[in-house]
Image: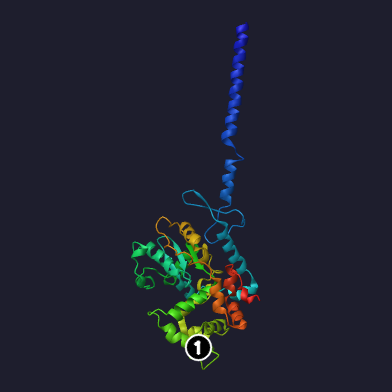
Amino acid sequence: MHQQWLLLAACFWVIFMFMVASKFITLTFKDPDGYSTKHELLFLTAVPEVGKLPEDKHVAGEVKPTGEMHVQPLVYLQRLELIRNTCRDEALRNLSHTAVSKFVLDRIFVCDKHKILFCQTPKVGNTQWKKVLIVLNGAFPSIDEIPENVVHDHEKNGLPRLSSFSDAGIQRRLKTYFKFFIVRDPFERLISAFKDKFVHNPRFEPWYRHEIAPGIIRKYRRNRTETRGIQFEDFVRYLGDPNHRWLDLQFGDRIIHWVTYVELCAPCEIKYSVVGHHETLEDDAPYILREAGIDHLVSYPTIPPGITAYNRTKVEHYFLGISKRDIRRLYARFEGDFRLFGYQKPEFLLN
């Protein structure tokens, strides 16, 4: 009898231990409030379709085709959000909005193979991005093998412009492709354009010195007896003139080196995926390649040290001696670019 009671007690103990172990296993591996819920939250906060921003600006991620989660750095979302908010500012509407005209579509280069659109903003390192797209389109096997004279020859470089497609093809690409462009401090970009086109003046672009410069001098030089070539002051006066467009029409598409980012890329009308900054290109270039899904196919060319840093001293030097009235007029024209992309108003205009 005693042995029977011992046997029953042992069975009861085994059953009890089995129930405890089962409960422990269930609690350990099911965990509905931990692992599973956490992943559901991440997918709910994933970035929606290209060009759109999530309402929650504190957490952002992107679902990759492989199912792998990549958390998007906040700075890139903040840039897009700044553009979106500035575009809504009615006081800046004339400076931030433009029609998606043929002029804009001519600035956008297409890589159908990888579904990429790149809007060209001259004097912001665009030659290197063109080389990247040329390789992706298959015209050359590597960046190093692209002759310099081919990069800007659109008959040979294999880079179609968005304007070359049908209306339906244009709309489809604008809605579904990865879209990006690069900006830099607007005044520093103007200095770069002036130096390149009027001071150094490449031999294959003689019209800047021999046609455009004389036109600007005739209209905007105050001292008619001065015989020097075009000065930066003449250039500033031309760009800041509210009636500059009649001269722009004479110069044609050659003005792309100094027109606003708004006029070039229509950032309020086209929902770009990423806007890179020249000043942070060391970080932005790899990020753009990753987001476009091409980082395993091509690398952005090596960036020389210091070349992307904002040179405040250079900017102040170029504007030294130019009247505040002319500088204010210039800023008024480019204010949309300053505001849309988060560049500070120059200190020499604040005094």
Residue 85 pos. (x, y %): 62, 66
Residue at left offset 52%, top offset 86%: 246
- Badge 1 amino acid: Ile
Q: Nearer the viewer, residue 280 or 255?
A: 280
Q: Dot 1: few (<14), some (14–19), or many (≥20) neighbours within 10 Å?
A: many
Residue 89 coordinates in the image, percent (x, y): 64, 70
Quadrant that contains the C terminus: bottom right
254 is higher (above) or lower (below) than 26? below
Does 344 sit left or right of 250 as displayed? Answer: right
Q: Position of residue 301 (x, y in %)?
A: 41, 63
**Residue located beneath label 1 in the image:** 217
Find residue 128 and report its image quarter.
bottom left
Query: Which quadrant, please, contains the N terminus?
Result: top right
Q: Nearer the viewer, residue 301 or 157?
A: 301
Rendered residue at 57%/59% (across/down): 75
| Residue at x 45% of width, y 73% of height | 106
Residue 59 position (above or below residue 260): above
Q: Is residue 332 above or below residue 79?
A: below
* Residue positioned most to the top: 1
Residue 264 image point, x, y percent: 50, 73
Residue at x 60% of width, y 15% of height: 10
